Structure formats: C-alpha cells, structure tokens
Amino acid sequence: MTFQRLVQHRADDGTRGVIWANGEQAVFVDQVDTTRALALAAIGEGRTLAEEAQRRAGSRGVDLAAELAAGRLLPAIDHDDPARMILAGTGLTHLGSAEGRDKMHKAAAQAEHQTDSMRMFLEGVAGGKPAPGETGQQPEWFYKGDGSGLVGPGAPLRSPAFAQDGSEEPELAGIYVIGEDGTPWRLGVALANEFSDHVTERHNYLWLAHSKLRPAALGAELLLGTPPADIRGTSRILRDGATLWEKPFLTGEANMSHHIANLEAHHFKYAGFRRPGDIHVHFFGTATLSFADGVTTQPGDEFEISAEPFVLPLRNRLEVGPADNVTVRAL
C-alpha cells in the first residue's frame, strides 16, 4: 500500500517549502511554505490534508534522499513560535513495554507486590482499547517541553551537562494542529526519537518527569491518513561507523495496549491543550530500548531509526551541551 507523505524543506538560501510525496513521486507544493500553513488552509477549505496537498502539487520534482543527505529537510512539523508547540507523550502503551520499565523499578520497590509501572501497564491492557463511545483507561502521561526542544533529521540530540544518560526511544509521534474553534486535528504521524535520561528515571520513578525534559528528534516525513496498524522497524546505534547495538521494534495499534484515539482523548480532554493555532507532537511510546539491554551511550554515537512505510531514516548524533550556571536573583 502506498502512503502519501509531506516533507518540509529549507533551501540553502533559507527559502522554505513543502514537498508532497506519493510513492516514488515527490514534488513541491505551490503557494505554501510550511505544513502548518497547509493544514490550516485545508481546515478552512473543508478538505483533508492529502486533498489540499494534491490540489496544490506543482511540477517541480525533488529527490528526497539527496535533499536529506544535503541537510535540507526539516522536522515533519514546526511552528514559527516554539512556545506554541507542545511536546508530550505516553508510556507503557505497547505490548511488552512494561518489561524493561518493571526491571528498572522493581529493585527500588524491594517488595513482592507489582510495581506501579506493571499495574499501569496491565490496566492499559484491560481498558486501553474501549468500544466506541466508552471512556478508556487513561495512560501514563509526560511533558517534554516546547518546540525549542525539537530537532529534525541529521541535527544533534544535545543532552544537558547535568544528565546522567542520553538514550534513544524509537516511536511514532502523532502530529496535531488546533483549529480556530478549538478542535484538535491529527495531520498524520512521524518517526521520532523520544530521547530520555533513563539513569535518572531508574534512580526513582518520581524522577520520570525530570528524565523526560530532554530534546527529541522528529523525522522528515509526515505520513498522511490513518497509520498502519502494524509498523515494524529497526533501531540501531552506531559508534565510530560500526553498529554498536541493533534491534527491531514494533509499533502501530496492533502492537499497542491502547487505541491511538484513547491516547488522544486523554490528552486533549484538557482545555489548555486546545488553544487555537497550537501544534502538538505526541509521542506514542515504545517497547524497545538499548538501555534495557545494558547499553551506555557516549557523545558521538549516532542513533538511527527506520520503519516502513516511511522511506527516509531518522539519524541524530548524541552531543553533550555546556554546563549552564543559573543564578536566581531576588527582585
């Protein structure tokens, strides 16, 4: 099955553009320079995003792989005001995702009873896929930051100097824009690396919120329409050009304990997340982590995430940022 995709592009002179891709065909879209602008136009015209893209598709072709290699492809979505973009996500959403988390926290629990992680996972298995019209079990939820923490393909993932770890999380991310009437519209999904600090999280589960306040990477392709139920990909880490760790990962609703609609319902039920014009990037979770296999990353390592039906991989190199000497002053 062929899926339509949208890709954001920035030329060497800074000119922005949007590319519509359908199978092997990829052409620039006329009269629009960002995916957000195209989405708002589609809402205003009462069309789907795919219909609006096709209607505006031009004749100027483009080689996506070459543009990716040249560093001209941007994240699948962005906002000219990063404060109007919310990065958030849900965990323990995938079948098998509790195993690594439970191992991480069981030692700290030192008890025979189930950890909170396992309890939440099992509650999601039991109630994360409700029948239409029913309210499903709410998932674990976390906040990652605003759009200033989002990077695109090829850009470095910069871990703060105080971090104890910087490791990958290969995921799907739902991309949303809020319409003028407060309606959340899902534009599609993108490949993502929901980069986290697992050593900090392992120390104490109550530090999960701290461990998630890190940058994240988003692939170039916005996959339009309903995403496939079964998506299979590969997550790998390269060190000095050689593969350090590699593992397949599964995502899509067939491999999840929650419907995507249930995750969306529990995110957008909060009025503060329905501010017209805002962009939301919502990470749907994963069950595959190199950290769970005992891998310790180091600066210079390159994360690579790929999965069909996405054509382009997501690659980002790990860096460590400078120390910030922050002083709070009384006024």
Image (cartoon, rainbow, N blue to C red):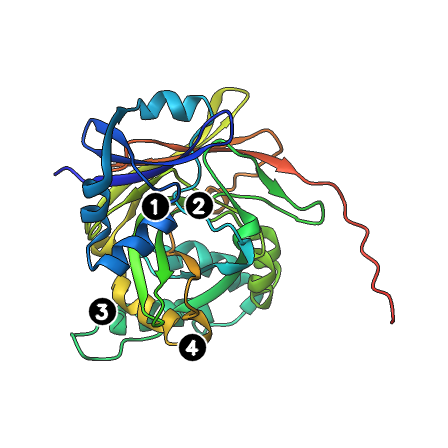
**Where residue 181 appears, x then y in whole percent?**
34, 72
Asked whether the residues under the numbered discs 4 and 2 touch, taking CB atoms below 8 Å apart as contact, a structural biologist would say no
Residue ID for mark 4: 271
Checking the image for residue 190, the label placed there is 1
Q: Which residue is mark 2?
A: 289
Circle 3 residue: 129
Q: Residue at x 57, y 39 (%)?
A: 296
Measure the C-alpha gap from mark 3 to mark 4: 23 Å
Who's the residue at 31% across and 22% down the image?
Answer: 63
Q: Is residue 210 left or right of residue 50?
A: right
Residue in front for this viewpoint, 94 or 39? 39
The residue at 19%/51% (across/down) is 229
Query: Residue 115: in sight, yes or no?
Result: no
- As measured in the structure, the alpha-carbon distance from the residue carrying label 1 to the one carrying label 3 is 22 Å
Quadrant in which the C terminus is drawn: bottom right
Q: From the top left corner, tell me how far across and down residue 98 is, in percent.
A: 39, 59
Q: Nearer the viewer, residue 235 or 179?
A: 179
Mark closest to the chain's N terminus, 1 or 3? 3
Q: Amino acid at mark 4?
A: Ala
Mark 1 and 3 residues: CB-CB less than 8 Å, in contact?
A: no
Q: Position of residue 292 (x, y in %)?
A: 47, 47
Say left or right for 155 vs 227.
Answer: right
C-alpha span from label 3 to label 2: 24 Å
10 Å crowding of disc 2: few (<14), some (14-19), many (20+):
many
Task: Indicate the secondary structure of the residue bearing disc 4.
Answer: helix
